[in-house]
Image (cartoon, rainbow, N blue to C red):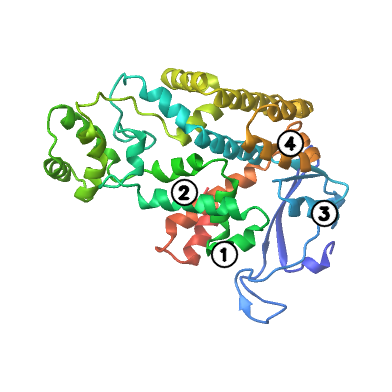
Amino acid sequence: MLFPHLAGVVVELVERAVAGVVTLHARARSSGAECPHCGSTSGRVHGRYIRRLADAAVGGARVEIICRDRVGAYAEGARNGAPQAVQVADAWHLWHNLGEAVEKIVSAHHACVRAGFESTAPAAPPTSDDIWQTPPPAPAAEMLDVCGRERRLVTRTRERYIAVRQLLDGSTLENICRTMQLDRSTVRRFARATSIDELLVKATNRSTILDEYKPYLHQRWNEGCHDTAQLHQEIVTLGFIGSIQTVQRYLRPLKAAIATPPARRPAPRSRRIVRWIMTDPGNLAAHDAADLKKIRTNCPELDAVTHHVRDFATMMRDLRGDQLPAWMERVLADDLPALHSLINGLSRDIDAVTAGLSTPWSSGQVEGQATRTKLLKRQGYGRANLDLLRKRVLLTP
């Protein structure tokens, strides 16, 4: 026997591609086995085993390419286990990291977007199912409660931001967590924010149960109906399940106005703007491209971000990793702290990033399988046990 230590394994098929890639289809002979550590019988793996990248593979082939994300532990493990292999930073993760940095910049400059859109009248009423649309009332309305005072969420966010910024001088994140009794992720989010506006945009522009009925409220207000109780009752008949206080808070800016305000064009939320920036210009709808052009005209920082993103996309598409140093220099020349932070991370893993932008290797198949498994798991959460989950993972195409 060629592999006597694999007597309990049935090799059903061995495929060897032209490029030297070997695919092995195998299964266990028995449906269960005893764990060598605890002695219990099980039909599935319930322990861990040691596997090293330097171990000889089937057919004597060695590990030559390691495609990974940019976590430092993965890089160190690859260097120690297979020093002969070329490490490649996965393109999907690079693009995702860039998108996260772009979202931070858009959030920090969302006031510029609002100012530009509120000065123009809408070409058509906003669709009721668009979760990215902001309401017609003034931005300050989102920060006030029904009595006209600053909302508790806004006050708390402002106080925490000031406290974290003060404690950052001479203190670590762990000490700040203990002092303020906050989770580390919360403290890190406040510490990394470039301004209070970046935090308030995310806190006050959340989707609400009233979003679906805002176009109707605005229409009825312009028709002359200013009775909050009546308007609340009307949208209740349409399916609204919220309280009258929610409607009062939304209508307060309109009541404070001397005359009925004209409908202002709603500004797109940060996530939609990020999608426009990260999308190939040739695939953008005409109205989306026009809105993005308006945003870039009103905000030089977002215009610079759009240029940098499109240059990076060109590098990825054309496999021109040699252009990465010049791209990084152009980014550092602009006042974009979130992108500067991304550049610092790329610099620590520059060889793998350059390889990821220069070669066709990608872990897209792996990421796709992970997404598929998570989807199957969430579909059955609370409705099925592990037996059905196992069959779905193995048998669902």
| Amino acid identity at mark 1 | Thr
Residue 371 percent coordinates (x, y):
55, 48
Tag 1, which secondary structure?
helix
Label pair 2/4, CB-CB below 8 angstroms: no
Q: Position of residue 272 (x, y in %)?
A: 46, 32
**First of labels 3, 2 by sequence position:** 3
> What distance separates the C-alpha of mark 3 from that of mark 4?
24 Å
Q: Residue at x 32, y 34 (%)?
A: 135
Residue lying at 60% horizontally and 39% vertically, measured from the top left: 96
Residue that carries the numbered disc 1 in the rendered image: 179
Mark identifier at residue 57? 3
> How dense is the environment of label 1, judged by Cα within 10 Å: few (below 14), some, or many (20 and up)?
few
Relative vertical location of residue 47 with respect to residue 205 in this rendering, above or below? below
Q: Residues within 10 Å of mark 3 (few under 14, many from 20)?
A: few
- Badge 4 is on which residue? 356
Amino acid residing under circle 2: Arg
Residue named by callout 2: 158
How packed mark 2 is, by other alpha carbons closer than 10 Å (few <14, some 14-19, many 20 or more), is some
Q: Nearer the viewer, mark 3 or mark 2?
A: 2
Among numbered discs 1 and 3, the one appearing first in the sequence: 3
Residue 145 appears left or right of 285: left
Q: Nearer the viewer, mark 1 or mark 3?
A: 1
Could you give the CA–CA distance between mark 2 and mark 4, rounded to whole angstroms?
41 Å
Name the disc covering residue 150, or none.
Answer: none
Three-letter amino acid code of the residue under disc 3? Ala
Give amino acid for label 4.
Answer: Gly
